Image (tube, rainbow, N blue to C red):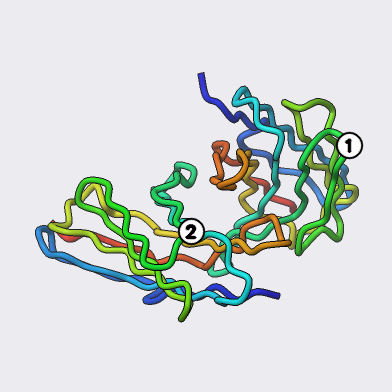
Amino acid sequence: ILNVEQSPQSLHVQEGDSTNFTCSFPSSNFYALHWYRWETAKSPEALFVMTLNGDEKKKGRISATLNTKEGYSYLYIKGSQPEDSATYLCASAYFGNEKLTFGTGTRLTIIP
Amino acid sequence: DADVTQTPRNRITKTGKRIMLECSQTKGHDRMYWYRQDPGLGLRLIYYSFDVKDINKGEISDGYSVSRQAQAKFSLSLESAIPNQTALYFCATSDFPTYEQYFGPGTRLTVT
């Protein structure tokens, strides 16, 4: 069973501050790393899909990096806003195992 | 209209009853998935299907069965519901080769 770990489990951040959190995953046979944003009472939506070591992706104030050799990815949020409050899920996929394994998420709350 | 729909959105049922959750998609994706979400456990894969004739068990398939009636439809059945199947159930689709997941709105199931 693959183990995808996210830390911290939850985080409170003041509006306007920047923050980041971590996803750790097994690096052997790695294929892709996904980040999803999951707002309360909605369904998860994809933020990024990354495959290459050193990949860096950006969408507005949110960005992500990927290190496939050591098996981790960071998600960064710059200048947090109340609408950033959500649970952020990461998931990894591997060659020969064509499905995602999800972490348990980081629950982010932005304090106005 | 939503690309991935689930019915019902909420359901309360009694122990021992058979129940079916339905999922339809208009994205034209071959790959469809059923997940359940429990607090603190993240999203766990129940079953997945890569086309109409290809059905695979996920990590927690015991007590569940599925039917892929067409490319657009994937149903999940609980043969004899039990209280620990109380959870939020998500259907998802994905394209190849990224496996980016497109989630339905979820079905909240309560087994009493």
| B88, A61: nearer the viewer | A61
Q: Is residue B107 visible?
A: no
| A95, B104: nearer the viewer | A95
Q: Chain of mark 2?
A: A
Q: Nearer the viewer, mark 1 or mark 2?
A: 2
The residue at the point 39 percent across, 48 percent down is: A47
Sort mark 1 into few (<14), some (14-19) or many (20+) by Cα contacts within 10 Å: few
Q: Which mark is residue B78?
A: none
- Direction left: furthest residue: A16
As measured in the structure, the alpha-carbon distance from the residue carrying label 1 to the one carrying label 2 is 29 Å
In the picture, residue B17 is in which quadrant?
top right
Q: Do the residues indicated by labels 1 and 2 lie within the same chain of the protein?
A: no
Residue linked to disc 1: B53
Q: Which mark is residue A51?
A: 2
On the picture, is B19 further left or further right than A6? right
Circle 2: residue type: Thr
Q: Position of residue A69 (x, y in %)?
A: 47, 78
Circle 1: residue type: Lys
Q: Of helix, strand and loop, which one carries label 2?
A: loop
On the picture, is A48 further left or further right than A61? right
Q: Is residue A63 visible?
A: yes
Q: Chain of mark 1?
A: B
Q: Position of residue A1 (x, y in %)?
A: 71, 75
Q: Position of residue B6 (x, y in %)?
A: 64, 32
- Direction top: furthest residue: B1
In the picture, residue A105 is in which quadrant?
bottom left
| B69, A85: nearer the viewer | B69
The residue at the point 77 percent across, 62 percent down is: B60
Q: Of helix, strand and loop, which one carries label 1?
A: loop
Sort mark 2 into few (<14), some (14-19) or many (20+) by Cα contacts within 10 Å: some
- Is the residue B32 above or below the residue A34 in the image? above
The residue at the point 61 percent across, 40 percent down is: B94
